[in-house]
Amino acid sequence: MAKKSIIESIRKNFFDIKKKEWPNVIMMSLFFFMVIATFWVLKPLKRGLLVNFYQEHPLQLLGTSFAGAEVEQLAKVVNMLVVYVIVVVFTLLSRKLQRQHLNLTLNLFFAGLFILFASLMNNPGPATSWSFYVLGDMFNSAMVTFFWAYSNDIFTSDQAKRTYGIVGLGGIIGGIVGSTVVVGYVNQLGRPTLLYLCLIPLAVMIAIGYYVNSRTKDTERPSQDPCAEGKRCSAIFEGADIVFKSKYLISIVGIIALYEMVSNIVDFQLSATIASSISGDLDKDAYFGFVGQITSIISLAVQLFLTSFVMKRYGVGIALLFLPIAITLGSVGFLVIPSLLFVTIMSASDNSLNYSINQSAKEALYTPTEQDVKYKAKAFIDMFVQRFAKVLAVVLNLAVAAWVGLEHVRWLSIACLIILVFWILAVRYAGRKFEEKADVEEVPV
């Protein structure tokens, strides 16, 4: 009897999912697995390719020489410009296409690009290195944004608290698989073969989209074209207009933008330390993949034992505090011990919490909002705001590196600690407003 009581307690605290919810939860978890597994194949490849090329052939720009880690910072600026084009295209497509058709369009688009770049990887030059780096960011921006918009469209706020631990778990496992594939096989198979293998998850995501949509016809999103209603229909500003009319959405902007600034600083510290500590072309790819492995393992533990438990018992606002507190401790630590080992631990801790409890809680913030917020405003926030915040961090990173040198990037942690104060304030406000909105949310029949 006591054993049964313990099992029931575990089920309610960690896996409180109703029988009729399981098919959608499993399918969306599998979808997220495919997205993140593909991303974690692309991420070390794109970073390794760019950093390796410019570590050996520094970029000469405006009389200044930029090495691998610094060139990666410049690439993030290019990403911001390209991604805003993706925001506009995503907004236009979301007006015209139902979610399963939007899913099909995005996956076919990236499949074509993967095939193209696989043919260019045998002799990569600067153009291939830059454009492939941008492709990796495009995939992450578009597919992760679409996945969470889709999830927020079919789950309510209450369901999000109970199910996003399992839904997000798929992404964690995907990260482990993707980074493990790179670490174990990049030297044997090479980059082109890994890109061809990425076509498999794209096909699976297309199939899942049609299956889940067939089960959720009652929540299917109607086509929303503001031009048909005589409203201003500029896709360039539509998402931004929605965002800046809401204090709640502005607080979400704050959470995401401030995190991206801090995370990019940590990422730069990692790249600079790896570039100066590890020699060899594919060895850097492998080490970036190794960091991904550590990240994914920690994420798995957090997602299984903390995410749903904390969100359900203590609320989304408390769940959102875990990451800034962890980064505060990590930033202080790296100031004291600026080594490859410690920056690896700091980076893995940062990303592992972001990919688990923070991501699930952050995405739950959108569940009690309107459809335009879930697709158009979210696209603007997740794609453009994130990248704009990264550009601000790039400017800071390069300025500090030019001032004190790449060997002293630990001093950037001081900027992190200042930003963290405002991040925590934004979390507290968004957490309170979410609970207010969730209390009055209408649950679909």
Image (tube, rainbow, N blue to C red):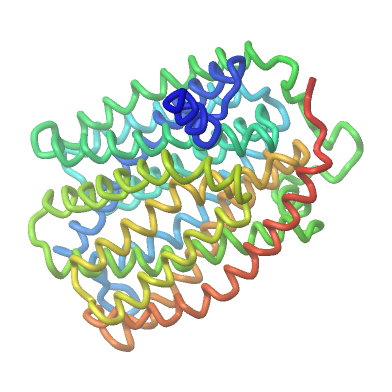
Answer above or below: position of 417 versus 29.
below
Residue at the extreme bottom of the image, as rendered = 403
Answer above or below: position of 45 versus 190.
below
Is 358 or 67 nearer to us in this picture?
358
Question: What residue is drawn where x is 60% and y is 46%?
Answer: 313
Horizontal and vertical percent position of residue 354:
45, 52
Horizontal and vertical percent position of residue 224:
79, 31
Question: What residue is drawn where x is 35% and y is 70%?
Answer: 330
Q: Is residue 167 visible?
A: no
Answer above or below: position of 202 versus 174.
above
Is 416 or 336 nearer to us in this picture?
336
- Answer with left or right where residue 251 lies relative to residue 206: right
- Answer with left or right where residue 380 lies relative to residue 54: right
Is 311 or 46 nearer to us in this picture?
311
Q: Is residue 275 visible?
A: yes
- Report which quarter residue 275 is drawn in: bottom left
Horizontal and vertical percent position of residue 386:
54, 57
Question: What residue is drawn where x is 49% and y is 22%?
Answer: 26
Residue at the extreme right of the image, as rendered = 230
Residue at the extreme front of the image, as rendered = 1
- Answer with left or right where residue 136 lies relative to residue 230: left
Question: What residue is drawn where x is 26% and y is 49%?
Answer: 294
Quarter of the image with the C terminus is top right
Horizontal and vertical percent position of residue 239:
71, 49
How many marks the image carries: the answer is 0
